[in-house]
Structures are given as C-alpha cells and as structure tokens.
Image (cartoon, rainbow, N blue to C red):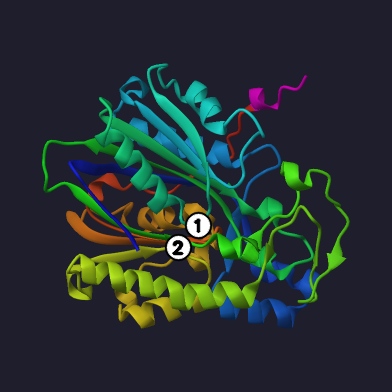
Amino acid sequence: MIESTIKGIKVIGVSSAVPTQKINNIDYSSVFGEDVVKKTIESTGVRTTYHSIDKQMASDLAFVAAKDLLEKKDISPSDIGILLFISSHHDYIAPATSFVLQKRLGIPIDSIVFDINLGCSAFVYGLHVASSLLKTTNINKALVLIGDSSSRVVSPKDTSRLLFGDSGAAFLIEKTEEDKDKISFGFKSDGNRFDDIYIPAGGFRHLKGSFDLFTEEDGWERSDYHSHMKGTNVFAFSVADVPKLVREFMKKEDLSVDKIDKLFMHQPNLYIIKNVIRKLKFTEDKVPMTIDKYGNTSGVSIPITMCNFYGDKNEGIKNVLLLGFGVGLSWGVANLFIDTTDIFPVVFSDEYYDDGFTTH
C-alpha cells in the first residue's frame, strides 16, 4: 500500500450535478425482456439512472456542479489556483478539457490546469493530487472537477445499459495553518489487469475501430467503441482486493468502524457494495447508497452519494472514509473530517456549452 498523510488541508465544499432525463430501468423490458430486466434490477439494485441529452458532455455536468459550488460558497473564480478535471470521457483528444472549463469558469491565468484520465477512483486520487499541489505551491485553493457520461459508451444491446448514469461533481480544497486539518490516504494500482474494464477503440492505438456490433461470450452485443468488462474478474477484484486495502489502511491509521461516522464508497452495484461492507464489518446504516437512484456514476459516485445524503442536512463535522475502485485497475481510500454544511444538494441541469462544438 502507498501511504500518504497531508496536513494543513481541508475539503471546504462538495457539489454534484445530474441531467434531468430520468430513465426507469423497467422500461427496458421491451429491449431485453421483462424477466432479464427484473433480475438485473434485483441483483444490481439500480432502478433509475439519469442520462444526458445529445449535446451535454461530462464536462458540462462538472461545470454545473462547479458553478453551483462557487456560488454557494461565495468564492470568486479568481481565488482558484488549481483546476483539475478527472474523467474517462473528455471533450477532445486535445486540448485537455480542463482548459475549456478554465475559460468557462473564469479561472485566472496564474493557475495550474490539467486533466487526469481516471474513472471510479477519481475522487480519492484527485483529492490527493490537488492536496499535494497545494502543499508544494503558493496556491491556497484548488477546485477538482469530475465528470463521466458512461451511458454514451455502453452498447444499447448490453444489459450493462441498465447500470450506468451520467453525472458531474466539484469539490474545493483549501490550505490551512492547522495540523489537525489533515487527510490520510492509501493507494494501489494494477496495470496487469488494464483490460478488465476498457474501451478498445478511440485512442491512437486503435483509432479506427469498428462501429459494428458483435456478440461476445456473455451473449450481449458491443462494438469496439463500447465499454467492455470482464465481469467475473471485476467482481473478484472488488470483493477481495478492495476490502484488503481498507483493512490495511485502517490498521495503519488506528481506525475502527466505531470511529468512522460514514463510509462513502463507489457505487458499482448493490451486490458488490453489500459484499464489501460485510467484509469490512460496517453496518449498512453507516454506508449511504445511491445505486438505486443514480446507478453507477463512475468517479462521481462518491461525491454524489455525499450530496444525496448530507446535502439537505446539518449534522456538524463528521469523520468519513472515502473508497474508490475500478478502471485501471486502481483503488484508493481516504480518511478526513468534513463539515456537513459544506456538502450541497444534487443539482439537475441540461446545460451544455454550445461554443464547444466549433469545428475547422
């Protein structure tokens, strides 16, 4: 396990956004058959998801979340010195989408701006990268944006279509003078399993893939541009490697289940979530879930679950554990204290950036 503790750092705001288009999974009965759909809903726990409209990208949802967060915190974009955008679904091959977001938000030239290509572990990894940059620069505030539009990369002939929703999130990190303000991390990565979750075409190694659907071993049809997942491998990774990291981290940090107020974890599906928390000996009341409402929202699943649970509550400062895992394969855990008044309700929007469609 890679260990890290960063002192003098504090999360001072979390916001999330989803599209307005609500998808009821039972309506897929006409595509996959009623029995298949009902069994999928029962095993995954996903009843509804939200899908973006045609012109709305992952970055648009992240932008909405960022704008909401800056307004509610009454923070000027000129105060932001670090802007990161984390996604598997960027606007362009070049430039990095974070530069488009810098323009839209009005972040000043005197700033550090770049993208990170990552999925389900995005919140934990992004929190560490931004915190590290704050500690080694003269910057006081960092804005990290996460966005994924997974519904766009799932085949219409694949029952995985029932699982994935689109969303965006933003969180603010601030440098403080207090050592008690700290965040501890634990990380692991395994590129040996890079193709357990992947999209074959679209990058330069396989730029001209086929859009034709073909039937795979599991019986569902996908093209080279659709998401491919080795389900058995991913399940084994999720219920074995992930809890092992958390146990190792909690032992190192002298943490017990009793000391943690809430565990906010990635929401892949209900079966995996329940297996992970059972192995960690957390009770379900300590692990808020949004899998039934928003589905698997990839890297946004942690902040959207925080916003869904604490967004309309004021329960003071809480000790939380954050757990992200998935594509890469990558997995990470973080422990911090956060003021629940800094976590805002989920925003619904179909806003998109029309100027972003300029072509040459």
Q: Label 1, label 2: how many angstroms apart (C-alpha)? A: 7 Å
Going by the image, does 16 lie left or right of 40?
Answer: left
Amino acid at circle 2: His
Q: Nearer the viewer, residue 352 or 177?
A: 177
Comes first in the chain, label 1 or label 2 = 1
Residue 16, above or below 31: above
Q: Nearer the viewer, residue 16 or 2?
A: 2
Q: Are marks 1 and 2 in contact (CB under 8 Å)?
A: yes
Q: Residue at x 45, y 63 (%)?
A: 266
Q: Nearer the viewer, residue 29 or 111?
A: 111
Residue 149, above or below 94: below
Few, some or many residues within 10 Å of mark 1 (<14, 14–19, 20+) = many
Q: Residue at x 37, y 77 (%)?
A: 277
Q: Which residues are magenta?
A: 354-360
Q: So how many labels did they put on this image?
A: 2
Mark 2, secondary structure of its residue: loop
Q: Residue furthest front?
A: 192
Q: Residue furthest top?
A: 109
Label 1, on which residue?
A: 120
Residue 6, labelled with which disc? none
Which quadrant of the structure image shows residue 132?
top left
Label 2, on which residue?
A: 266
Quarter in which the C terminus is drawn = top right
Mark 1, secondary structure of its residue: loop
Quarter in which the N terminus is drawn = bottom left
- Queried whether the magenta region covers residue 328, the answer comes back as no
On the image, the x and y values in percent for residue 258 come to 18, 74
Q: Residue at x 41, y 27 (%)?
A: 112
Which quadrant of the structure image shows residue 235?
bottom right
Residue 322, above or below 285: above
Amino acid at circle 1: Cys
